[in-house]
Image (tube, rainbow, N blue to C red):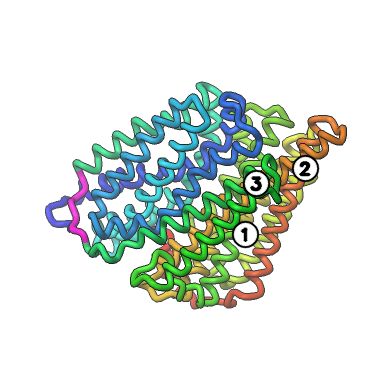
Amino acid sequence: MTHGIDERKRWLALIVLCLGVLMIVLDTTIVNVALPSIRADLGFTETSLVWVVNAYMLTFGGFLLLSGRLGDLFGHRRLFLLGITLFTLASAACGLALSQGLLITARAVQGLGGAVVSAVSLSLIMNLFTSPADRAKAMGIYGFVGGGGGSIGVPLGGLLTSTLSWHSIFLVNVPIGIAVYAGCVALLPAGRPQADRAKLDVAGAITVTASLLLAVYAVVHGNEAGWTSAQTLAQAGIAIALMIAFLVIEARVSHPLMPLRMLALRNVATANMVGVLWAAALFAWFFISALYMQRLLNYSAMQVGLAFLPANIIMAVFSLGLSTRLVMRFGIRAPLSLGLLVAAVGLVLFARAPAGGSFVLDVLPGMVLMGLGAGVAFNSVLLAAMSDEAPDEAGLASGVVNTSFMMGGALGLAILASLAAARTSGLAAAGADAFTALNSGYHLAFLLGAVAAVMASALAGAFLRTRVATSDAASVCQRHRSA
């Protein structure tokens, strides 16, 4: 598939692919700073606002594995172009949205486009670079973009929201998407499909995504409808039934979206459980801390973006390979368990931050600890998930744990944000002033996030195998950095 491509075009194609992936990665973090502005402009409630984040995460996670199969069926280049098109059009719709429904729907389409781009971009790079030296160099560039790109999102979101408006964080994707599409058409070779239609697990993707969407919806609206109301209980029951149907489908189809046999492997099963708990804590922290700084500390969007910089810089440094060197030196279990505990301490510090706190005393210490904890935990969870798998299935294991991570983040964010809103409403009804009630709700979310991180740390410490061989860790790391 690389015949007829000269060296210059090959590296230009890599730049184009990385630009497309960077655009997707940025959108997982850039929106957090703009959430209070979106809330005020479109009239979201504190709990319904989570759908601006969750609509993206649910479709992204739900279709991540299926998109890889679609690439085999229709060709990776064609799917990449389709994903970029979907993402760009959805970004335009987000930027022009004047209603809650349109914004949430467009965010869901963004997530679908992002899943397609993320799933097939690695295959395209593998086809472009066949020599070991060039492939290693290309993977290093790609891994840096994927690992460190999210660090740019928060300050960039703050800058755009402060200088223009929240609409601009989405509209900026339009010219980038057009440029990426044009570059791909000009530079990428057409590939041939490698799979037949029998290998497409559409039913699995539909049932698991519908189950999680309904579960999150039930949680988000539980405060309004009542946690024991017929509506909430019926939605939760249908969500559980759909999840059972998903497991039955995965057990019976010949090419499942999430092979259940993988979950019989100790490290894979543990990594997925840890990923769910850790994502719940991490995404809730991103969401709640941005609201805390803007609503209780009166930070501008730009100030919030700058406040996140310490954590994001530390995460980016670890993504360059420092966390992998720790794993190669000490094994998977100790760095992962310790990293999650450090993050839990950071969340506890946020849980004691007063309504009129200062950056140096009440924000910075928690940011630093969250950056350290997340920096160690990210790669370690993925390395744990892939360490029990054969080399030719490491990508699938990575995709499974990434899916668990996105789904855990969506459901965890919905639960913690809803519980925070319920506590705030209860205290306000009891006569507490608005700032005290709001901060108490945020404190509850941070504390529950810390509990989730501690549980994840305990699982990692108790069930993960102590060490993988240095050579295995290095090879798994290289595969992850390219994913």
Compared across the picture, whether 346 is left or right of 83 comes to: right
Q: Earlier in the sequence, mark 2 or mark 3?
A: 3
Give the quarter of the image for residue 90.
Answer: top left
Observer-side mark, 2 or 1, equals: 2
The residue lying furthest to the front in this view is 230
Residue 259 percent across, percent down from the top left? 42, 70
In x, y percent, where is residue 285? 65, 46
Look at the numbered disc 1 and give the secondary structure of its residue: helix
Q: Are marks 2 and 1 in contact (CB under 8 Å)?
A: no
Q: Separation of disc 3 and disc 1 at Cα?
A: 13 Å
Tell me the kind of residue under disc 3: Trp
Query: Label 2 crowding class (10 Å Cα cut-off): few <14, some 14-19, many 20+?
Result: many
* Residue identified by numbered label 2: 423
Q: Which structural element holds mark 3?
A: helix
Residue 285 — which label? 3
The three-letter amino acid code for the residue at tag 1 is: Leu
Q: Residue at x 60, y 35 (%)?
A: 306
Residue 201 rendering spot, x and y as whole percentages: 35, 62
Q: Which residue is mark 1?
A: 277
Q: Nearer the viewer, residue 174 or 136?
A: 174
Q: Residue at x 50, y 67 (%)?
A: 383
Q: Is residue 224 above or below residue 409?
A: above
- Depth order, front residue of 406/244: 244
Residue 79 at x, y percent in the picture? 28, 50
- Disc 2 residue type? Arg
- Please check the rendered image and state whether residue 256 is part of the magenta-colored stretch, yes or no: no
Q: Residue at x 51, y 27 (%)?
A: 99
> Which stretch did the figure color magenta?
187-193
**Badge 2 or badge 1: first in the primary sequence:** 1
